[in-house]
Amino acid sequence: MSRVLLDTGAFLWWLDDSPLLSRRARKTIGSADNDCLVSLASAWEMAIKAGLGKLRLPQPVARFFPEQLAANRFSALAIELRAIAAVETLPPHHRDPFDRLLVAQALTAGLPVVSADAQFDAYGVKRIW
């Protein structure tokens, strides 16, 4: 079984069955051969955006995130100090702090990332899209 990290957009697009999700990403996420992880950084990002009115969710993040993980058989990826520390040494290719943390998590854990964001490529992260 392969482990893959979904970025926030891929996670939300999967839940919405959005046509914005590429065919390859959809196949990767839907495969029983893959263990899909969603970072707690994504839950944090969703909470901030929902609080600012930039993201509408059917429930508060405290319920939405764990319920959707369980319903989709995804796992939460904890934020470890080694990933936080890795952010410090990342070149400034990407300015979004959530995406920088996802990059650091992917690099420190050796995970490919399901993401439409081509800026991940500059860090040498294997990106599935």
Image (cartoon, helix red, strand yellow):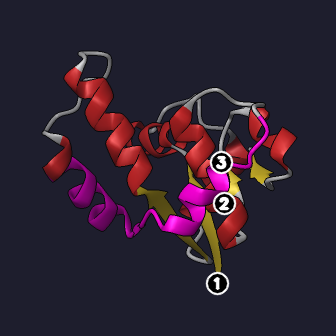
Ranked by sequence position, the earlier of labels 1 and 3 is 1
Q: Nearer the viewer, mark 3 or mark 2?
A: 3
Measuring from the top left, give residue 109's x and y in whole percent: 65, 71
Q: Which mark is residue 1?
A: 1
Question: Spatial distance from mark 1 to mark 2, Cα to Cα?
Answer: 17 Å
Q: Tell whether position 64 is magenta.
A: yes
Q: Which mark is residue 88?
A: 3
* Side (left or right) of 4 relative to 69: right
**For the residue labelled by badge 3, is the local secondary structure a helix, a strand or a loop?**
loop
Q: Is residue 64 left or right of residue 22?
A: left
Q: Secondary structure at mark 1?
A: loop
Instruction: Between label 1 and label 3, give the one nearer the viewer.
Output: 3
The amino acid type of the residue labelled 3 equals Glu
Q: Nearer the viewer, residue 7 or 101?
A: 101
**Which residue is labeled 2 in the image?**
106
Q: Is residue 77 magenta?
A: yes
Q: How would you rate the neighbour count of disc 1 (Cα within 10 Å): few for under 14, some for 14-19, many for 20 or more?
A: few
Residue type, numbered disc 1: Met
- Is residue 104 positioned above or below 108 on the image? above
**Could you say where residue 119 lies in the image, as x and y percent from the top left?**
77, 32
**Residues shaded magenta:** 63-91
